Image (tube, coloured by chain):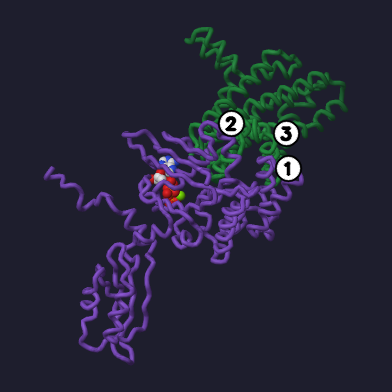
Amino acid sequence: MHGFIPILKRELAGYFVTPVAYVFIVIFLVLTGVFTFQLGGFFERNQSDLRPFFDFHPWLYLFLIPAISMRLWAEERKSGTIELLMTLPVSRAGAVAGKFAAAWLFAGVALALTFPVWITVNYLGEPDNGAIFTGYIGSFLMAGGFLAVGACVSAATKSQVIAFIIAVVLCFGFLLAGFTPVTDFLSGWAPPALVDTIAGFSFLTRFDSIAKGVIDLRDLIFFASLIALCLFINAAVLEARKA
Amino acid sequence: MQTLIELRALTKWFGTPHAGGILAVDGVSFKVERGEVLGFLGPNGAGKSTTMKMVTGFLPPSSGQALVCGNDVAVNPLDVKRTIGYLPEGAPAYADMTPEAFLNFCAQVRGLTGEAGRKAIARAVERTNIQGVLRQPVETLSKGFKRRVGLAQAILHEPRVLIMDEPTDGLDPNQKHEVRALIRDMAHEGAAGCGRAVVLSTHILEEVEAVCTRVVLIARGRVVADCTPAEFMSKSRYHNAVTLALVPPPGVMVFDELRRIAGVADVEDLGTSSTPDGTQVRCTVLASRGKAIAPEVSHLIKSKGWQVDLMRVEAGRLDDVFRDLTTANQPQPTKAAPAGAA
Ligand SMILES: Nc1ncnc2c1ncn2[C@@H]1O[C@H](COP(=O)(O)OP(=O)(O)OP(=O)(O)O)[C@@H](O)[C@H]1O
Ligand SMILES: [Mg+2]
């Protein structure tokens, strides 16, 4: 993991020296607000929990997370700085993990900045703060999953646009894997074991249960191993396609 | 002497051999000793950058080895990267960072933190003269300053091996001069007096005369010359040639007289012009390989009493040797192997 800390710091600072961070955070906050309070019927439901808030996270992430991940490696390739980075004494693992960790932390900052929603719900009623906490954990893990998939895609191309589109498509696949219409469609012809496996990759199902306040070790392991696998592939792609 | 860089039959294929692949580097071998400044020359696309990318551990070689301070790049990439300072072609740097932040990052990655880092950065900044632009984002810098930031990054940690791909490309004449002085310094001093090895690629041949102690010329991925700059120049057909401008009496066949001297290979006509004293004839008298003809030429002129406006002995022309060596044996599309006869 040589170079992990300096790369993490550089990347994180990189978000804030350009408008990227501010634009992203503002859009994320505005959209969560709109979704939660307008579309989600936060007030009409008359329940003091954050279900409407969390329910929209997967769909927000679907577009916003690839927007963060697309530049991770594609930009380095395009500008040639990848040659500089990979000839500094950093290990591939350090570079891959450092970039990913910075992006994930940044997503975490954006997520943490939604705290007024939490304050609102506490002001209005007496929510189950434990469930809200696990909701945040689940949302953060899901963001990590999306980011890892996106980072992997970004490593394979010079073009940020391509990295964005492919990441959105892949993430959409991960979201829909457990969606009832999809599983119904699959179970028509695929063997049940395959349907279960595919459904098992669903971010939606796993996030749903965490957001309900149920932390299942298997869900945590799923996200952790998905992230690890993607980062491993990310490093392999870098090695294979350097120039 | 101590070998700091050693290439052993380094080869690089882009794509698969025999299936439309490009053989960019074809069995390149050479050594660079401590204190040497090696000029790495070759026409566009010869494989200079590719070779450097393999030595610095960016690209894996298809076959062969690159050893830096005894470490094989493929085996100990981190150790090698620690000993090398590298300026990639085009001096890439993170566009939205300031040079200050960028150098800080490089220092940290290289383990230069705190006071050591500050000192290293201050020294590199001073040597590359970028004090004035430290707080300006790299993307707004001029090409020359960008390159200097890249240079600062490369020398930051006082590397034992310095590899630079076209370091003076885009610099103004003053900066070229400064960078050349810097390169010479870097080769001689070295941390703890251990000296360094410097490899630089360039298309500016005067640079070779100015800083290099050795020349390696490659063409189409192969080494075609490995020698000192003086030896390199002596391969020129202009080596030991004498360039003359004289005003002979009318009717004298100057060229024929010159050609009659032993050791003269040929005389090149450089044109004539009329002067108040008569018609001035300019020419270059070429010497046969290894012959010094200057004494004979001046003896002839003296004995004939010709008026000499200029007489200069040529050391050789680098670009001429460069052209000869890199275009020799090249398949000529028009006069290619007699396809019909074969
Ligand atoms: N990533 C790549 N994929 C395919 N071919 C490549 C790649 N990089 C370089 N080449 C080819 O390898 C050959 C050598 O290129 P290289 O960049 O090493 O040349 P060079 O000597 O540095 O030239 P220049 O003086 O123009 O910088 C060229 O034919 C080039 O097209
Ligand atoms: Mg080049």
Numbered disc in front, either 2 or 3:
2
Quadrant location of residue B30?
Answer: top left
Mark 2 sits near ligand 1, with its Cβ under 8 Å away = no
Q: Is residue B323 above or below residue A179?
A: below
Q: Nearer the viewer, residue B62 or B253?
A: B253
Tell me the residue at 76%/30% (across/down).
Answer: A37
For mark 1, what is the residue? B113
Q: Is residue B94 visible?
A: no
| Circle 1: residue type | Thr
Tell me which chain the residue with mark 1 is part of. B
Of the numbered discs in the image, which one, if any, rests on residue A150?
A: 2
Q: Disc 3 to disc 1, how far (Cα)?
A: 46 Å
| Horizontal and vertical percent position of residue B327 | 31, 54
Q: Earlier in the sequence, mark 2 or mark 3?
A: 3
For mark 3, what is the residue? A34
Tell me the residue at 48%/41% (across/down).
Answer: B6
Tell me which chain the residue with mark 2 is part of. A
The chain coloured green in the image: A
Q: Is residue A214 above or below residue A40?
A: above
Label 2 SS: helix
Q: Disc 1 to disc 2, how far (Cα)?
A: 32 Å
